[in-house]
């Protein structure tokens, strides 16, 4: 019969919608509850204590909505606080974006020289380097913080001269180091993939952590038997009526999913559409005060 509960996905902002996009593509029967902490974005320049606290608040907000799996679609939280979240969240799997991306890069790097770009906190944590070295200690890993990339995406400057200059400024050094794989260690960065690829050249393979995280979620749900039923199975369970409310409620995909933000900014919808590749069906505001209330709840 499957498990019709939604997948919980959160990020410090809207970048995690690139993970949601890949989940919809790989698993069209699934529905998502997405939480973007847009009032407190970015997390990348904050202290580790604050990142852990915000991440746990976000996670608890989704747990209250009865999700069956939690995807931490934030490289900063995944780099700094994934072990912390796993200790405090029981009963459902927790997936970060670091390990899937690290695995993909480690198995594809013939030269054993991998670059990682991300927020200052992600690069400083060396989380990708540790994950890669656990797979193959002979691989050299080079990190480069790219703090301008997120605001450029948020401003919609995807294909502009200023973006190309910023990419060149950050990444020419990586090219000179002789890397053959570059991990896009922030969920905003896939939107800049064409500009990045044209800058570094086709000899460097770009690793989109959003894609590999969605595949990891798919594999875990298959192993645990918690995938949603296919549409035909949903119709059969509901008595065969296509318009039956049970079928409509159990159906997956974008239209059946929910999107929450701690602040709905003027360019929220435009940025979300660019990242997701489609318009959001609706936006629900979850005030920061409501997220902070989660700290008062007994730990899991």
Image (tube, rainbow, N blue to C red):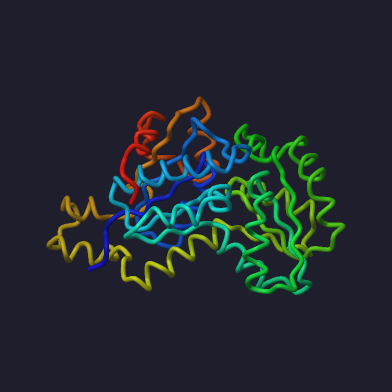
Query: Number of marks in the image?
Result: 0
- In the image, residue 210 sits, relative to residue 49, either above or below, namely below
**Residue 88 % position (x, y):** 39, 53
**Residue 171 % position (x, y):** 79, 50
Q: Nearer the viewer, residue 97 or 268?
A: 97
**Residue 258 % position (x, y):** 35, 43
Q: Residue at x 63, y 57 (%)?
A: 127
Quadrant position of residue 45: top right
Direction from residue 63 to residue 35 in the image, left or right: right
Q: Residue at x 50, y 39 (%)?
A: 272
| The N terminus sits in image quarter | bottom left
Q: Nearer the viewer, residue 50 or 24?
A: 50
Q: Residue at x 29, y 46 (%)?
A: 65
- In the image, residue 95 sits, relative to residue 280, either above or below, namely below
- In the image, residue 59 sits, relative to residue 293, either above or below, namely below
Direction from residue 37 to residue 240 in the image, left or right: left
Q: Residue at x 35, y 46 (%)?
A: 62
Direction from residue 210 to residue 62 in the image, left or right: left
Extreme residue toward the right, this view: 176
Extreme residue toward the top, this view: 266
**Residue 285 % position (x, y):** 37, 31
- In the image, residue 50 sits, relative to residue 86, either above or below, namely above
């Amino acid at each position: 019969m499957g498990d019709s509960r939604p997948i919980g996905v959160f990020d410090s902002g809207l970048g995690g919608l690139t993970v949601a996009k890949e989940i919809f593509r790989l698993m069209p029967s699934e529905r998502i509850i997405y939480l973007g902490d847009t009032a407190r974005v970015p997390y990348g320049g904050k202290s580790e204590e604050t990142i852990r606290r915000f991440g746990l608040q976000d996670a608890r907000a989704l747990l209250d909505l009865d999700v069956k799996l939690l995807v931490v679609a934030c490289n900063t939280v995944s780099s700094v606080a994934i072990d912390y979240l796993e200790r405090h969240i029981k009963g459902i799997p927790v997936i970060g974006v670091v390990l899937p991306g690290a695995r993909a890069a480690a198995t594809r790097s013939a030269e054993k020289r991998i670059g990682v770009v991300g927020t200052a906190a992600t690069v400083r944590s060396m989380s990708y380097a540790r994950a890669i070295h656990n797979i193959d200690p002979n691989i050299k890993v080079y990190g480069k913080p790219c703090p301008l990339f997120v605001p450029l995406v948020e401003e919609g400057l995807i294909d502009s001269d200023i973006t190309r200059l910023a990419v060149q400024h950050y990444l020419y050094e990586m090219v000179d180091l002789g890397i053959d794989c570059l991990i896009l260690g922030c969920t905003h960065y896939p939107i800049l993939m064409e500009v990045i690829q044209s800058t570094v050249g086709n000899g460097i393979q770009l690793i989109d952590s959003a894609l590999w995280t969605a595949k990891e979620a798919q594999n875990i749900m298959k192993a645990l038997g918690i995938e949603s039923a296919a549409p035909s199975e949903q119709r059969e369970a509901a008595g065969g009526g296509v318009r039956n409310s049970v079928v409509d409620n159990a159906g997956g995909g974008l239209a059946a999913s929910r999107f929450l933000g701690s602040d709905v900014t003027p360019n929220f919808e435009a940025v979300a559409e660019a990242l997701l590749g489609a318009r959001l069906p609706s936006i629900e505001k979850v005030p920061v005060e409501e997220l902070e209330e989660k700290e008062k709840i007994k730990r899991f």
